Image (tube, rainbow, N blue to C red):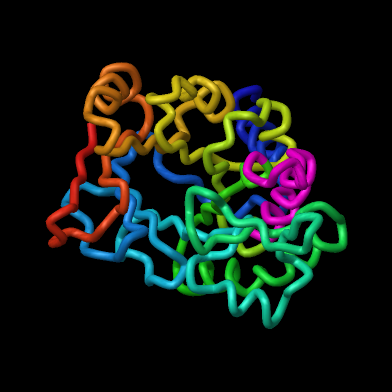
Amino acid sequence: MLRSVVPPLAALLAFSLVSPATAGVHKPPVNGRADYQLGGAYRPAKGVDIVTRDRSALPAKGRYNICYVNSFQTQPGSLRWWKRHHPRLLLRNRRGQLVHDPGWPGEVLLDTSATSKRRAIARAQKRWYAGCARTGFDAVEPDNLDSWTRSRRLLTRRDNVALARRLTRLAHHNGLAIAQKNTPQLSRRQSRRVGFDFAVAEECEVYRECGRYTRTYGRRVIEIEYTDNGRRAFKRACRKRGGRISVLLRDRDVVPRGNPAYRYRWC
């Protein structure tokens, strides 16, 4: 009698713990072999489970696909579009000059400093997230969550976390899982309150930050190391975590296979 009652009860309890917003969301496979194809799409190697591509590309057939969106800064080549359609959403300093990312020429920070602006930024990206879902992506990777650290104190962590919450709701509404991209400054509590489903961590072995992600997301972490840092960090990462999370090595410009600069390895 007890045996026949427990399964339905367990199922009922499990169902009650699933948020309606995340019920259709599928997280990336744990420890799956991942490929990072932001510099151009190409056929994934045999054995690759997870592929990340820009939102302008099509997903790879038969893989778990992550859609890259530059959600906190302008994408190179898109500044004219932002100036024309959403000039108020571009961050400016006190002299009215646009604030650029010093490490990425052509990328201007979006202004997350006010609720009305965060709402407008999310609204501007609504069709991008919907497009990722419509073309067959499984998840979204909103980049430059840490843009406040390059804003010359014009933005705060709180501003960006508030926008991240809106983007998480937008992703889940479209049936997409959503990644925390880098940003080890977030506490475990902050990350969970935002609602991220997994993490994408670049160079976390180089900067000794990987534990901050695994403590929050367990094995649902995709770690990317780059060849211009040498290969020691990648080898250490493989020894430490290669059997638990996804760890890969890529050339800095993540160029497509066939380019002489192409480099790609996994643990």
Residue placed farthest to the bottom in the image? Answer: 84
Considering the image in quadrants, where does the N terminus appear? top right
The x and y percentages for residue 246 are: 35, 35
Q: How far from the left and from the top, in percent, is residue 264? A: 21, 45
User: Along the horizontal axis of the image, is 168 left or right of 131?
Assistant: right
Closer to the camera in the image, 233 or 130:
233
Tell how many labels: 0
The foreground one among 160 and 133 is: 160
Q: Is the magenta stretch mostly helix, strand or loop?
A: helix
Taking 219 as reference, is 19 left or right? right
Q: Name, please, the residue furthest toward the front.
A: 95
Q: Is residue 49 above or below residue 212?
A: below
- With respect to residue 182, does 44 lie above or below? below
User: In which quadrant of the rendered view does residue 95 lie?
Assistant: bottom right
Question: Residue at image x 68%, y 46%?
Answer: 151
Task: Give the position of the C terminus as an image quadrant.
Answer: top left
Q: Where is residue 129 in the image (x, y as percent from the top left)?
A: 59, 66
Task: In this rendered view, identify the residue nearer to me: 4 or 203.
Answer: 203
Q: Residue 183's spot in the image, x, y percent?
A: 58, 36
Q: Is residue 177 visible?
A: no
Residue 160 vertical placement versus 209 (above, below): below
In the image, the segment drawn in magenta is 149-171
| Residue nearer the viewer, 204 or 12 | 204
At a point 33% along the width and 17% down the height, the residue shown is 240
Residue found 63% across the figure and 29% down from its top: 185
Q: Is residue 158 magenta?
A: yes
Q: In the rendered image of this protein, does residue 90 appear above or below residue 234?
A: below
Relative to 203, 266 lies left or right: left
Examine the structure image and report whether residue 170 is included in the region drawn in magenta: yes
Residue 27 is at least partly visible in this image: yes
